[in-house]
Image (tube, grey):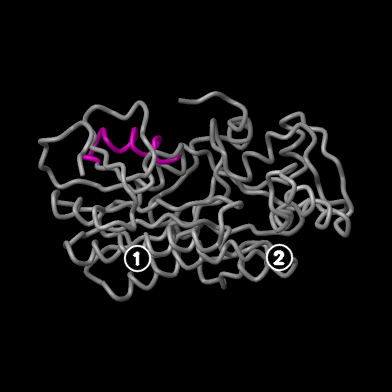
Amino acid sequence: MSAKKGAGDERPAVLVTGIAGNLGRRLAKQLHRKEKVIGIDRRPFPGMPKDMEMYQLDLRKKKAEDVFKRHPIKAVIHMGIMHDPRMSQEEHHSFNVLGTSRILECCARYGVKKLVVLSSSNVYGPSPDNSNFLTEDAPLMAASRFSNMRDLIEVDMLGQSFFWKHPDVETVVLRPVHIVGPNIKNAPSNYLRLARPWTMAGFDPMVQLIHVEEAARAMVQALRRGLRGVFNVVGPGEVPLSKVLEELGRRPIAVPHMVARPLLNTLFRYRLAHFPPPELDHIQFLCAVDGSRWAKEVGWKSAYSMRDTIRAVESEGP
């Protein structure tokens, strides 16, 4: 096991899992100005800041624990979660849940004082029964309609369980709304880049988006001493899906919901579409969250307007 760059600095470090993804790279560039940063990821990190260290390895392997043995780690930001709708559920579970469990075990074993777990507001699940703004106490129901969400819910609950089992560790679970931005390739960003996106005929749900730079800033804020708990993190507000598509100049195709699901299932099976059918719930039903707890705790205010957040989907980034 060898680290890339930055070796020799033995200050207590912030360890970031999943650092080589688009969100992780932005987090690293914000965080390394203030902290010593060590990253773990299976992927390479092109353009990594020179004062950082990076271990290219699998979280499930014993070598991940060796990073804790080798370095004093004062905080962990865990965002090493796989999101690939075409990957088998077994592989997803193994990487996401077993990888998270190993990282949490290392936090407890090696005296880490701060843990930040990146979850998502998607764990609540879009539903026709949802209230207008879901608080952090709302049940996590996403898996009832989308089985691939089970892993993310389990990761979220592992973070919550760790919070109660290890009161000596300041544990924060963040549930940001849909993250969008330059080069972000998650389902919301990919959908908004479509020239002719589907909409569900007769439905126009409110949408909450957060700029990728804001999501990274939230994780930096979560390292604040004394902060602990579960928090929804929102961007500049909410807006109807139709207005988002209008701002981007899209020409949506209204599809009857009774037809949409079986049609998308066929397209997805033959790799003619990149969205699994359960994703249609997000353009049909409401899943808006209340971010007031986070705003109160850290004085959170969005630095991006809704227009700038929406337009960031098409802008070029590093």
Which three-letter amino acid code belongs to the residue tagged 2?
Answer: Ser
Q: Which residues are magenta?
A: 23-37
Q: Which sits in the foreground, 110 or 61?
A: 61
The chief SS type of the magenta part is helix
Local SS, label 2: loop
Separation of marks 2 and 1 at Cα, in angstroms: 29 Å
Which three-letter amino acid code belongs to the residue tagged 1?
Answer: Ser
Q: How many labels were placed on the picture?
A: 2
Q: Nearer the viewer, mark 2 or mark 1?
A: 1
- Residue 86 x, y percent position in the rendering: 61, 51
| Residue ID for mark 1 | 101
Q: Which sits in the foreground, 78 or 215?
A: 78
Residue drawn at (39%, 36%), measured in percent from left and top?
A: 25
| Residue ID for mark 2 | 127
Q: Quadrant of the C terminus?
A: top left
Does 281 lie within the magenta span? no
Residue drawn at (87%, 49%), measured in percent from left and top?
A: 255
- Residue 66 x, y percent position in the rendering: 19, 53
**Label 2 crowd (10 A; few <14 / some 14-19 / many >=20):** some
Relative to 102, say whether 67 is above or below. Answer: above
Does 36 lie within the magenta span? yes
- Residue 315 x, y percent position in the rendering: 58, 25
Picture quadrant of residue 131: bottom right
For residue 88, side relative to residue 144 (left or right): left
- Judged from this view, the residue extending furthest toward the bottom is 165
Residue drawn at (59%, 61%), measured in percent from left and top?
A: 148
Q: Earlier in the sequence, mark 2 or mark 1?
A: 1
